[in-house]
Amino acid sequence: MAAPSAFPTPLVMRLLAASVSVSYKAGNIIRDILKTGDLGIIEKGKNDLQTEADRAAQRCIVATLHKQFPKVAIFGEESLDPTEKIPDDYIVKDLDPGVLSHPCPEGYKDVTDDQVVIWVDPLDGTAEFTQGLLDHVTVLIGVAVNGEARGGVIYQPYYNYEAGPDADLGRCIWGLVGLGSFGFIPGTPPADKNLITTTRSHSDWIITEAVNSCEPTDIIRVGGAGHKVLLLLEGKVHAYVFASKGCKKWDTCAPEAVLHAIGGRLTDILGNPILYHANVQRQNAGGVLATLQKHQWYVDKIPQEIKDNFVSDKPSEEMLEKKRLLASMKFQSGDAGSSVDPPEFSQGDYSKASKCSDKTKL
Ligand SMILES: Nc1ncnc2c1ncn2[C@@H]1O[C@H](COP(=O)(O)O)[C@@H](O)[C@H]1OP(=O)(O)O
Ligand SMILES: [Mg+2]
Ligand SMILES: [Mg+2]
Ligand SMILES: [Mg+2]
């Protein structure tokens, strides 16, 4: 037996390794349930469905991560009965060796349980799943550190499904800001076009106006937040524009981290960061805007009359305290030239941030 390492694997790397491993299992569960032909569809609200695949995949992911990381806060999209018996084989014990083969970036080595929040969307693209648009479906597991999206897993259970009945299905994409993203071939979108992706199943006139104001040459309407960020990662579109409050933290945490890890950005449509601390509002009340390049150009293109309908996330007391502390250090050192803003304050202006209201039931 190998001697135990003097340097235990840091929490963030173990969390990502566990999330990658459990995403494969969640993908199997989703495929198995579709094969039964009985999706057990429940209507949660207007244009908002849940299937047995959403429920079962969440049970598997949350039970696994809770078992391995009992002190870490985990929020899943679906409201489920916490007393329900979870099948033994839903608890995945593996840590993906591919993730563990990477060195942990310096900034994450001392991260503790209380600094982390996991956001789980067990099945993103439910509307499309029920309509047979299977490649729009993803499983999303996001790792937020100090309120920012840092690590993410996007598992696409039906990747390759058009290759026929014997095709090997599924792929796992994961990333960590500071390390990089893995599991796909990055691409660059055509320079002579402006391809914009947006919703196909939750559209309204504001969403359409916001997309049109960004001067698209083509509009690609597909399902799922995870799927749309995959289009960005692979260079199939230039921007993802969603001027709607419909997406929640579990829709954007993992995609944001994977995109950010290769140099892209995902913010609200005001250009402010989306925050992921435990008591943040669940709804992305500022909408969603994601790009690989020229982010500010898209922010500037969206008219103020549209922006006025949206509100950015409010930072937590801890974030504000950290900012105050850093500001006082800057004052004491008398170094007015160098920036000491912590990363969560580096991208946006909080002066217009909304009051935090958490009305969404978990
Ligand atoms: N109005 C809404 N109601 C419920 N979920 C929404 C709404 N708008 C977006 N979403 C969630 O965000 C994802 C991306 O939106 P869209 O596909 O419309 O672009 C959806 O697949 C859905 O996630 P989920 O499928 O996990 O419920
Ligand atoms: Mg849903
Ligand atoms: Mg979703
Ligand atoms: Mg979902």
Image: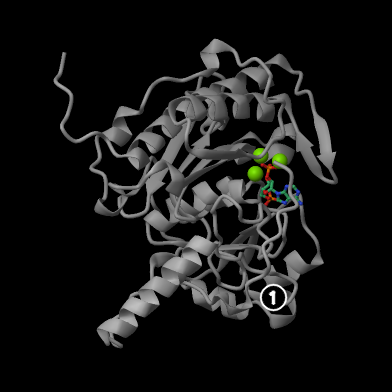
Q: Quadrant of residue 332?
A: bottom left
Q: Is residue 335 visible?
A: yes
Coloration of the structure image: one colour
- Residue 317 pos. (x, y %): 53, 63
Above or below: residue 199 compared with residue 84: below
Instruction: Please name the residue shown 75% across and 72% down the image.
Output: 309
Residue name at image x 26 percent, y 82 percent: 333
Rendered position, 71 above or below 269: above
Q: Eyeballing the image, is 350 above or below 331?
A: above
Quarter of the image where the C terminus is located: top right
- How many marks the image carries: the answer is 1
Name the side, left or right, on which 48 lies relative to 180.
right
Can the viewer see residue 169 in this picture?
no
Answer left or right for 66 relative to 82.
left
Residue at position x 68%, y 20% from top? 83
* Secondary element type, mark 1: helix
149 left or right of 34? left
Q: Height in image: 7 above or below 152?
A: above
Amino acid type, label 1: Lys
Please tell me which residue lies in front, 33 or 342. Answer: 342
Q: Position of residue 138 (x, y in %)?
A: 57, 38
Where residue 143 appears, as percent x and y from the top left, is 46, 45
In the image, taking residue 204 as reference, residue 151 lies left or right, namely left
Q: Nearer the viewer, residue 354 or 131?
A: 354
Residue visible at 52% across and 34% down in the picture: 159
Q: Where's ligand 3: which quadrant?
A: top right
Picture coordinates of residue 327, whole percent (x, y): 39, 78
Q: Which residue is mark 1?
A: 307
Q: Quadrant of residue 311?
A: bottom right
Label 1 packing within 10 angstroms: few (<14), some (14-19), many (20+): some
Quadrant location of the N terminus in the rendered image: top left
